[in-house]
Amino acid sequence: MNLGWPQGIYLALFFLSVCLHASKNGQPRTGTYDLGTALISAAICISLLWWGGFFS
């Protein structure tokens, strides 16, 4: 596993997104902020990127 700048920046943005959803969990917006959905979405995206070789 090789983490360069693009991979580090991408992971940092995912981390910030999950933290935002955690801090605003349940508050209204167009839908509602949902931490569970944010975690599942991040896990799926990171898994697909890993499978596709982005972190190699």
Image (cartoon, rainbow, N blue to C red):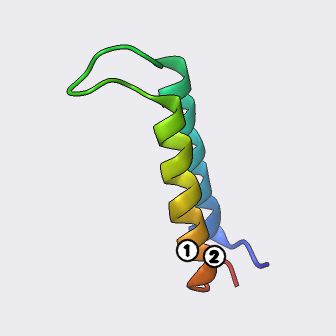
What residue lies at 47% left-to-right and 39% top-to-bottom?
Answer: 37
- For residue 50, above or below residue 18: below
Alpha-carbon neighbours of circle 2 within 10 Å: few (<14), some, or many (≥20)?
few
Residue 20: x %, y % from top left: 49, 28
Q: Quadrant of the N terminus?
A: bottom right
Q: Residue 39's quadrant in the figure?
A: top right
Position of 2 compared to 40: left or right?
right
Position of 42 compared to 55: left or right?
left
The mark found on residue 49 in the picture is 1
Nearest the eye: 49 or 7 = 49
Q: Is mark 1 on a helix, strand or loop?
A: helix
Position of 23 compared to 55: left or right?
left
- For residue 50, above or below residue 34: below
- In the image, what residue type sits under mark 1? Leu
- For residue 23, above or below residue 17: above
**Residue at the spot of label 2:** 50
Residue lying furthest right: 1
CA separation in Å, label 2 and label 1 = 4 Å
Residue 36: x %, y % from top left: 53, 35
Residue 9: x %, y % from top left: 57, 58
Q: Is mark 2 on a helix, strand or loop?
A: helix
What residue lies at 61% left-to-right and 86% top-to-bottom?
Answer: 53
Residue 3: x %, y % from top left: 72, 72
What residue lies at 55% left-to-right and 25% top-to-bottom?
Answer: 22
- In the image, what residue type sits under mark 2? Trp
The answer to whether marks 2 and 1 mark residues whose Cβ atoms lie closer than 8 Å is yes
